[in-house]
Image (cartoon, grey):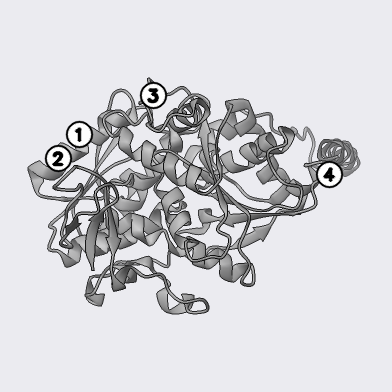
Amino acid sequence: MLLRCVLCAAGHPSTLRYACGRCGGLLEVVGESGLAPPPGALGMWRNAARLSVADQAAIVSMGEGDTPLLRARKVEAQLPGFQGEIWLKDETRNPSGSFKDRLVSAAISKAIELGARGVVCASSGNAGASVAAYAARAGMPALIVVPAATPDGKVTQIAAHGAVLLKVPGHYSRSYDLAMALAEQEGFANLTTTFLNPYGVDALKLVGAEITAQLGGRTPSHVLVPTGSGPLVKGVAQGFAQAENPPKLIAVQAEGCAPIVQAFEAGAEAVTAWGMPQTIASGISDPLIGYEGDGSYTLKLVRDSGGLAVAVSDDQLRDAMQTLAQQEGLYAEPTGASPIAALKKIWAEGRLDAQAIAVCMITGHGFKDVRVYQAMPARSHLVDDPDDLAAVARLCSSALAEQGRARG
């Protein structure tokens, strides 16, 4: 196994390296250890770290992966005339509540194998929580750098695992820069979950194998992916690379931070960094300042697949969150719900085939950002006299009728 530059194809040894030594491009894992498992063999590859870690004693796993794929019939019913299938890949079931556990298990395991004495991670919240949890499991010191405005639920989770938490004023890219400097200063492995750590990114290819197995060997026509810099887009693309008809990739961003969508709509090949993000979707509020090449690479993956880059508003995100929670029973943070918002948008715009088999990556749990739900209207009722059962029954009857009307 070795590392290869996605731009100039230069090869590098399998070390703690984060960019091509020749051109500065992104690195990817290649070689036999980087192959995805054959269909039907997922049980042997439950933790993605096995893809790149030769020393099995170095593997740190908490049962990540093998998440459910759920049919979303009520979402389908909200798309008039739709005759296909909508599926939800429920990544909230991972140990720390997000898909980041897939990357972090592989990245920290490789770091241990290569002799790292600690880890550092820049995060908008979910990756930091994952690194903090896996570092605690491994008994390794961890430095987590987050924007000061990171939602309390994510900050609390990071702190609970005992990591050293650093809050930085401003956007995510400032945290990214500080984590890079700290990794070099301290000699720690950098587990930042952009494209920076190739071992973590490589682990995401298992998503494709899981989806194929869960669909009975079928390949979806579309996969909708919440997108900051885009490593999950690459993982999905790699996971379906051998399919006869790989799915179209739909990169979903928030209107308040959409550098990849901006370039897609302009027909540009290179992504330009965004300014200060303005969105409730903290998990994809990455302006890509200083590493715009990550976005340009993701843009190419999307275009090569025949897919789309789509931006959704905060109101569309709130609607999608309510749809998932109240119609499908999934409690997702704004970023995790973003594929549902995009799905509704592209259907309304006529950009989704009526026979599509679409998989929505629900990437993060609702407990990550409860403040968004707390700001939504709640159907709660004060019971003045719990002993007056008849009055309570009337209240319940009225409330249930209102709920039925709301659900249509």
Q: Viewer-proximal residue, 267 or 237?
A: 267
Give the residue at mark 2. Answer: 182
* Kind of residue indicated by mark 2: Leu
- Mark 1 in CB contact with mark 4 (< 8 angstroms): no
Mark 3: amino acid: Trp
Q: Disc 4 marks which amino acid? A: Gly
Q: Measured along the vertical axis of the image, is residue 65 above or below residue 128?
A: below
| Residue at point 47%, 55% (across, down) | 237
Q: Earlier in the sequence, mark 3 or mark 1?
A: 1
Question: Where residue 246 appears, x then y in whole percent?
Answer: 55, 58
Provide the secondary structure element on which disc 4 rests: loop
The residue indicated by pointer 3 is: 274
Give residue 263's position: percent from left, percent from top: 45, 29
Q: Is residue 55 left or right of residue 271?
A: left
Q: Which mark is residue 81?
A: 4
Of labels 2 and 4, earlier in sequence is 4
Q: Nearer the viewer, mark 2 or mark 4?
A: 4
Q: In 3D space, how far apart are the residues under numbered discs 2 and 3 (Cα atoms)?
A: 24 Å
Q: Earlier in the sequence, mark 2 or mark 3?
A: 2
Mark 3 or 1, closer to the camera: 3
Residue 155 in sight = no
Mark pair 1, 4: CA separation: 50 Å
What kind of residue is marked 1?
Leu
Circle 1 is placed at which residue position? 178
